[in-house]
Image: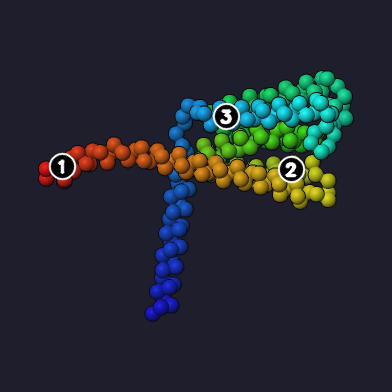
Amino acid sequence: MPGAERGSSSAMRMRIDWRTLGEWGRQPAPAQAGPGILSTLLLILCATYQGGMIGSAVLTGRVGDGGLVAGIAPTRIGFAILILAAMGSTALLTARRRYPLAVFLIECAVYVAASALGLNNFFLFPVLVALGSAVSRLPLWQHLAVIGAACLMATASAVLVAPPGVLMEEWLSQVVAVLLTVIAAMMARSVANWRAAQAGAKPSGSASGRFGPSAIAR
C-alpha cells in the first residue's frame, strides 16, 4: 500500500538520521597536535583587535559608543590595568590547547566582569577564540556544557551592558556570535576527525591491496 510504504520509508529515514547523529556524537575529540598556522594567526588577530580597542580608548577616552567607567578613564593607572588585563587575556589563549576548559571558564569570568564595567568589547575576541577551542577539543558532553555556559555568559553580559530598551538586541547579537563560533568549531572538529579517519584507513587499504584476493590471483 502506498501509505504504508511512505510510512516505512520515513521511519527508516528517521532511524538513519538518528544513527548518523549518534555516530557524530560518539566521535572522539581530535588528537592533540602542535600549534599550527591558524592557531598563531588567531593569536595575532586577537592581539591586533585588542590593540586597536586600547588605542581607540586612549585617544578618545571612550569605548565604542559609550564612555569609560568613572575612575578608569581619567587615570593612567586605570588604563595600565586595562592594558594588562587585555594582554593577559590574549596571553592566556596560548594554553587553550592543553587546558581548553579551564581557559574558557577564565575567559568567561573575565568577560562578565568586564561587562559589569562596560568594557566587554575589549574581551570579546579572546572569549570567542577560547569557546571555539573548547568546543573543537573537548568530548561531546563537555562541549555541550561549554555551549550552555557561553549562552549564560552572553545573557549575563547583555543584562549588565545594555539599557532596558535595547536588551533584546544586545542579547541576540551576543548569542549569534556564540552560535556562529560554535558552528565553525563543530565543522573544524568534524573535518579533523574525517581527516584522521582517512589517514588511518590508508595503511589498511594498501595492505589489503597488496595481500588481497586480487594480489593472490596475480
Distance (Cα) linking label 1 and label 3: 47 Å
Q: Looking at this view, is 150 or 87 the one in front?
A: 87
Residue 95 location, x and y as percent? 57, 26
As helix, strand or loop, the secondary structure at mark 1 comes to: helix
Q: Residue at x 43, y 61 (%)?
A: 15
Q: Which of label 1 and label 3 is nearer to you?
A: 3
Quadrant for the C terminus in the image = top left
Which amino acid is tagged 3? Leu
The Cα atoms of the two marked residues, 1 and 2, are separated by 65 Å
Confirm whether residue 102 shows in the render. no
Which residue is the extreme one toward the bottom? Answer: 1
- Residue 100 x %, y %: 57, 33
Task: Nearest to the eye among marks 2 and 3: give it.
Answer: 3
Residue 215 marker: 1
First in sequence: mark 1 vs mark 3: 3
Residue linked to disc 3 = 41
- Rendered-image quadrant of the N terminus: bottom left
Which residue is depicted at the point 61% across and 35% down? 129
Q: Is residue 54 left or right of residue 30?
A: right
Q: Is residue 1 left or right of residue 214?
A: right
In the rendered view, does 199 fall on the left or right side of 178? left
Coloring scheme used = rainbow
Q: Which mark is residue 156?
A: 2
Proximity of marks 2 and 3: CB atoms separated by less than 8 Å: no
Mark 2: amino acid = Ala
